Image (cartoon, helix red, strand yellow):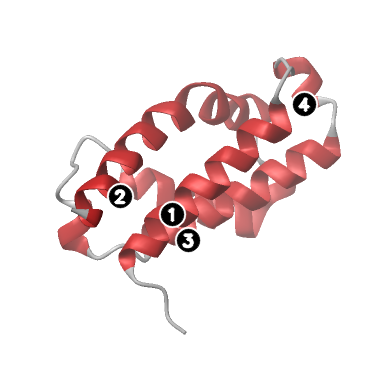
Amino acid sequence: MPHDWEDRLRDILRASTEIRRFVAGMDEQAFRNDPKTRMAVLAELSVIGDAAAHLPRHVQTRRPDVPWEEICRMRTLVDHAAEGLDGHKVWNVVATGLEPLEAVVREMVAEAER
């Protein structure tokens, strides 16, 4: 059964929640030194990127403040060069990018449910 775009938004929220759960209590150094957590985070970042890539353009353009193209590019990087990704950059995405993205996506889901 194909996902509709509201399901894609929920995929983003679920993956983001999982990432935050994986890194709870960690700092950047601990994250970089834990290959299992890094790989789990990368897998969920791929889910986020895939979901974002499948959002219709009209949905993305409602929120031009979200860097949709960067999110989609991250998925490509994760899927094709996970081992070569800079751990510092990945940590920055996790530490600074997920909360704002979650807030926007929660608003979008709420709007869709009205």
Between marks 4 and 3, how big is the CA–CA gap?
A: 24 Å
Give the residue at mark 2: 109
Pinpoint residue 9: horizontal percent, then vertical percent. Answer: 38, 54
The residue type indicated by label 4 comes to Arg
The residue located at (40%, 63%) in the rendering is: 7
Pinpoint residue 101: horizontal percent, then vertical percent. Answer: 38, 35
Between marks 1 and 4, how big is the CA–CA gap?
A: 28 Å
Do the CB atoms of the residues marked 3 and 2 lie less than 8 Å apart? Answer: no
Instruction: Give the side of residue 16 with respect to residue 40, left or right.
Output: left
The residue located at (22%, 55%) in the rendering is: 112
Mark closer to the chain start, 1 or 4 = 1
Mark closer to the chain start, 3 or 1 = 1
Between marks 1 and 2, how big is the CA–CA gap?
A: 7 Å
Give the residue at mark 1: 10
Secondary structure of residue under mark 3: helix
Q: Nearer the viewer, residue 91 or 58?
A: 58
